[in-house]
Image (cartoon, rainbow, N blue to C red):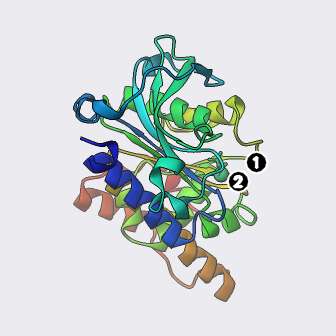
Amino acid sequence: MKVLEAKFVQGFIRMCNDGWEQGWHERNGGNLSYRIKTDEMESVKEELVYTGEWQEIGTKVPGLAKEFFLVTGSGKYFRNVILDPKDSICIIEIDETGENYRILWGLENGGRPTSELPSHLMNHEVKKEISGGKHRVIYHAHTTNIIALTFVLPLKDEVFTRELWEMATECPVVFPSGIGVVSWMVPGGREIAVATSRLMRQYDVAVWAHHGMFCSGEDFDLTFGLMHTVEKSAEILVKMLSMRPEKLQTITPENFRSLAADFHVTLPEKFLYEK
Ligand code: 13P
Ligand code: ZN
């Protein structure tokens, strides 16, 4: 079948548009990547072209050798993906060393995959390993409220996790392992990719101070839902801090322990500190 007829491609395009509609993708902000399954690659092989030039990734991901990814293009706008996917996204192949990629489909008017490809691929490499191959989606968005919080909260995993958990009862169930925070760094390179993928060993969410967020998940629904849940919680926190910085009441560490028992999740004690 044609690439655009495949369910995984349609799911990818829908997710780009959902993110645009949330207001997380001004201009070319944000990027998305999906590690394609073998049978999905087989289903679209008629349109793939294996003569493109190999290009350097800018980092090394030997754990992803010979894998295939659907990725947004650098400088492309999420709002245009649904209108002109062939111009905005591409399928890439990773070579056997894990150091180079080539384009097999898409970006038909030229261009290259997202400038955050090192972060996407290093996160994929970590998540593929520790999830036993289950995680396939890495999503980067410029989520307004999380970004606002990086100016007023200490840039600590414990503080972001605890404050966001307190804002909505479902949060500790949706992201029980917590959230990591990367201090401001230059985006688009290997250094920020190394820092982010280190956090992805522990968490499914990494905040980039004054920039946005990265989320990892098994499929499009779970990964979009994770980004949405964290950002909504951040929105409640922003509203709460704007109304009255001191809480009158909140969810307590004891409440979290009861929730963990009933919902069968493990909440690390490092987030349940006394304030
Ligand atoms: P790209 O257009 O290269 O994907 O970059 C957007 C972005 O959000 C960089 O962090
Ligand atoms: Zn960005």
Task: Examine the rendered structure and indicate whether residue 56 appears above or below residue 226.
Answer: above
Classify mark 2: residues with Cα within 10 Å, few (<14), some (14-19) or many (20+). some
Judge by depth and name the residue closer to the eye, 223 or 67. 67
Instruction: Give the image location of residue 123, x and y in percent.
Output: 51, 35
Q: Amino acid at mark 1?
A: Trp
Let me know if residue 139 appears in the view.
no
Say which residue appears at 68% left-offset and 29% top-offset: 190
Judge by depth and name the residue closer to the eye, 199 or 48. 48
Disc number at residue 184? 1
Report the side of 190 relative to 223 (left or right).
right
Instruction: Give the image location of residue 6, x and y in percent.
Output: 27, 46
Q: Are marks 2 and 1 in contact (CB under 8 Å)?
A: yes
Q: Amino acid at mark 2?
A: Ala
> Which quarter shows the C terminus?
bottom right
Is disc 2's CB within 8 Å of ligand 2? Answer: no
Report the side of 263 relative to 181 (left or right).
left
Give how far apart the Cα atoms at labels 2 and 1 are. Answer: 5 Å
Classify mark 1: residues with Cα within 10 Å, few (<14), some (14-19) or many (20+). some
Please identify the quarter of the rendering in which residue 245 is found.
bottom right
For numbered disc 1, what is the local secondary structure?
loop
For numbered disc 2, what is the local secondary structure?
loop
Say which residue appears at 73% left-offset and 57% top-offset: 210
Instruction: Give the image location of residue 30, x and y in percent.
Output: 59, 54
How many marks are shown on the rendered structure?
2
Task: Tell me which numbered mark, 2 or 1, is placed earlier along the sequence.
Answer: 1
Q: Which residue is mark 2?
A: 209
Report the side of 232 relative to 221 (left or right).
right
Task: Examine the rendered structure and indicate whether residue 95 appears above or below residue 218.
Answer: above
